[in-house]
Amino acid sequence: MTDFINTGAPLEVATYSVGRSTHLLVDDQRRNRYIGVDCWYPAVEGSSTTLSNYELLPGIGFTSHALDGATPLPGPHPVIIWSHGSSGTRHVYSQLCEALAGRGYVIVACDHPGNTMPDYVLNLAVDEETNQRQRIEDLQFLVDSVAGLRPGFDHGLTLDYDQIVVGGHSFGANSSVSFAATQSSGPVMRGVAGLEPYLRTVPAEHFSALAVPLLLIGADHDTTTPPPIDMAFATKHLDEDLLTALCLENVGHQGCSDVGMYLEVAPRIAGVPEMVTDYIATMSEGVTGTAGDPWRPVVLQHVEILGAWLNELFGVDRGTPTLSDATSRASVSIFA
């Protein structure tokens, strides 16, 4: 028996229909390490009417707006490689990723085995040093697979390999910066984006080696990765001409993730264990800093700023606000 509740209204009116595909890749150069991957992409209107299912637990989850089996819109499309936060998963950012795909971007997100929620539940989590190393290797493998340099990833998309950004949330930002600074093969990244970033353990030499623009979006109610600690670390070691650093007001550490949506949807899904809803409830203040605040406007702030930054980075006009307009509308303060 399955029970999938719809998330309701989208964050914004999408320019394109959104498709989603899921994949399981195997890195045969690392003892057949299995990497789960999700792709969100602009799709041909009307090519599918089947909503994609997001499982919180086997047979239990939600649907949103992405369509399963939708035909990709002819490209080439700019690409965002996405890395999840510690103890997260690749689809904990479904609302953010769907909205960006609706703006014309392809988002390719992977799990980092050893640092997902199931790994913690099953006592399979790795130590932080191992996690940092494995994450960078995962991103290298994913980029090479996306570019067709490694076999087994038949994504069916036409991608623009001159327009690729790597980004992530929290520890995913840490991984993204270090990967972009040390990348050894595949298409060269055009930029790096970090949302509510955990940066204090990034080696200073990685910031010094970073030669592409870096967008950092912090949150003033973030007690997990406080901007005065983590974002300040970046400003000390990075060329200021490459850095765009913003601090959102009345936003917490989970402001860009699906946590707010889970708080709304999970209690309505039959079969979700009480321990799961109780765990999600512990993060209720992580969206804005105040439990019960609406989550959609907060996630949309991230979409608007990240989308505007991408447009400027790639030199495209998608009819969306400029970065300065997006930051002004989002009540954003510049982090110095």
Image: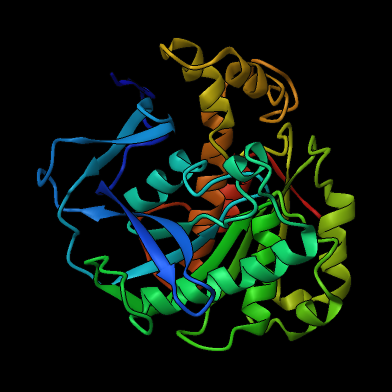
Snapshot quadrant of residue 309: bottom right
Instruction: Give the answer, above or below, for where 251 lies relative to 24.
Output: above
Q: Position of residue 243 (x, y in %)?
A: 71, 69
Residue at left offset 78%, top offset 59%: 128
Q: In which quarter of the view is residue 306 placed? A: bottom right
- Where residue 198 sits in the image (x, y, percent)? 76, 55
Question: At x 37% / y 31%, what residue is drawn?
Answer: 10
Image coords of residue 318 (percent x, y)? 35, 59
Q: Position of residue 222 (x, y in %)?
A: 79, 39
How was this image coloured? rainbow
Task: Evaluate whether residue 14 shows in this view.
Answer: yes
> What's the residue at 62%, 45% (across, down)?
119
Please, is residue 250 above or below residue 271 in the view? Answer: below
The front one of 28 and 86 is 28
Q: Name which quarter of the figure residue 130 lies in.
A: bottom right
Q: Across the whole image, how many numbered discs are drawn on residues?
A: 0
Between 308 and 40, the one lying in front of the other is 40
- Quarter occupied by the C terminus: bottom right
Taking 232 as reference, is 329 above or below it? Answer: above
Q: Is residue 305 above or below residue 252?
A: below
Let me know if residue 164 appears in the view: no
Comparing 126 with 194, the one in front is: 126
Q: Residue furthest left?
A: 46
Q: Is residue 102 left or right of residue 75?
A: right
Image quadrant in which the N terminus is located: top left
Q: Residue furthest bottom?
A: 184
